[in-house]
Amino acid sequence: MNDRRHELQQNDLAIYLDRINKVIEPHSKVIAVVIGGLIVAGLAWMLYNGEQTSKRSYSTFELIEAMNSNDTEILAGVSEKFPGTLASEWAKLYQANQFLTEGVDALFADRDNAVTLLGDAKKAYENALVGATDPLLISRGHFGLARAHESLGELDEAIAQYKETIAVGESDEMTEKAEERIAALGKPGTKSFLAWFADQDFSPSDPSLPPSLPGSASLPDLPDLDLPDLNLPGGENSTVMESDEGLELPADDGAETGVKEEASETADEAKGEEVKEDSKAETASAE
């Protein structure tokens, strides 16, 4: 009975497989092509993924080297060599940071060069922000762009970029720093100082000389510093300097005695030499 049942089950399975085969057989070539294509696509994806991973690693390594060089051209090369990578976007940002640093330093040596460098910094920051998706990069880009505008005395543009930094909401620290700068730029004293500073040119007439400093007449007024009276001893109402009791130094008797003794010994030696010479002279005349 069991053998009969087993034979019937095998017959049913054979009939079922035969039906499937008849359905598939007309499309067997198409199915084979599809399966082969899936295999090739899988292999291609594996190769592409491995290549992209290697590319990201290599681009990150070159970015680190470029950052250590502080060279804007090398950073630009990393950005152009690895387009579409996160390293490329950060290379643009670090390039802008370097332009900003050099521009701020040049403000005290070469005003024209400083304006050029700060202009390059603004363009580099704007270029770094194009298509950026990383909140950290976007936040740093707007903040750096605000710094560049502020260094050139462009206060309205600087405040607008600080507000963009706050809008990103990347971190509480960046938001707080941007709010501090907005508050500082809104003060009349800050505005007057930046307006004065924007008109200054510290470039020396002779390039071999150090940067010159502005005259005191051209400097903006300092705030009124109402400092408390320290009441230190020695002031107008102090009797410290009027006291007759000064510092009593020990008498230099020993030094004087030593000098006198040395002078006496020198005189005795001189007399002894004279006596010897007289004796020699008398002996010679007697002979």
Image (tube, rainbow, N blue to C red):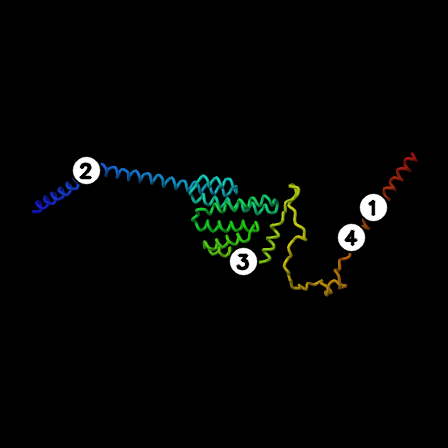
Of residue 75 and residue 230, the one placed in the foreground of this image is 75
| Crowding at mark 2 (Cα within 10 Å: few <14, some 14-19, many 20+) | few
Amino acid under label 1? Answer: Thr
Q: Which residue is mark 2?
A: 26
What is the secondary structure assignment of the residue under circle 4? helix
Of labels 1 and 3, earlier in sequence is 3
User: What is the x, y in percent for residue 52?
Assistant: 39, 41
Disc 2 and disc 1 in contact, CB within 8 angstroms = no
Of labels 2 and 4, earlier in sequence is 2
Q: Residue furthest right?
A: 286
Amino acid under label 3? Answer: Ala
- Disc marking residue 255: 4
Q: Which label sits in the foreground, 4 or 1?
A: 4
What is the secondary structure assignment of the residue under circle 3? helix
What is the secondary structure assignment of the residue under circle 1? helix
Q: Which residue is mark 3?
A: 183
> What residue lies at 25% left-to-right and 37% top-to-bottom?
33
Q: Which residue is mark 1?
A: 266
Spatial separation of the CA atoms under disc 4 and disc 1: 17 Å
Of labels 4 and 3, earlier in sequence is 3
Spatial separation of the CA atoms under disc 4 and disc 3: 71 Å
Amino acid under label 4? Answer: Ala
Spatial separation of the CA atoms under disc 1 and disc 3: 84 Å
User: What is the x, y in percent for residue 199?
Assistant: 62, 50
The answer to whether residue 257 is left or right of residue 227 is right
Q: Residue furthest left?
A: 1
Of labels 4 and 1, earlier in sequence is 4
User: What is the x, y in percent for residue 130?
Assistant: 45, 46
